[in-house]
Amino acid sequence: MRTLALDIGGTEFTIALFEGDRMVRHGAGDRFSAAASVALAATGSVHEPAQFGNLVASIAILKRGTGTASPAEVREAAGRGI
C-alpha cells in the first residue's frame, strides 16, 4: 500500500493512498471533502478525517456514474485494511 506523508503544523501524519483497477476520475474530491468534513466535526482531529475521506472516495470512484459509499461498504473496506 502506498502512503502520503503530511506535515501539518509541525505534526506529521501518514495517510494511506487507496488504489483500484477501474477508477472513475471525477467526483473523488467531492466525496473526500464530504466524508472528511463529517469526520472532522465528529472527531476534531486531522488524521482520522483524512483517512476516512480517502476511504470513502476510494470506494465511490470504483463505481460507474454517481458513486456512493454505503456504511456497510465503508465498514467492510475498513475491516479489510484498505
Image (spheres, rainbow, N blue to C red):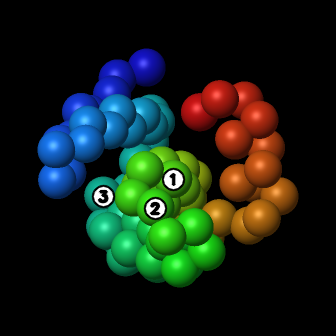
69 vs 6, left or right, is: right
Q: Position of residue 31 (x, y in %)?
A: 45, 71
Q: Is residue 13 above or below residue 63?
A: above
The residue under the point 17% across, 53% down is 9
- At label 1, counting other C-alpha atoms closer than 10 Å, the crowd grade (few under 14, some 14-19, many 20 or more) is some
| Disc number for residue 25 | 3
Q: Position of residue 20 (x, y in %)?
A: 46, 36
Residue in the foreground of this view, choosing between 4 and 62? 4
Query: Is label 2 in contact with label 1 (beta carbons under 8 Å)?
Result: yes
Q: Which label belongs to residue 48? A: 1
Q: Secondary structure at mark 3?
A: loop
Residue at which label 2 appears: 45
Determine the CA span between mark 1 and mark 3.
23 Å
Amino acid bearing label 3: Arg
Farthest residue toward the front? 10
Amino acid under disc 1? Glu
Residue 17 at x, y percent in the picture: 38, 36
Seen in the picture, residue 73 relative to 4 is either above or below; the reply is below
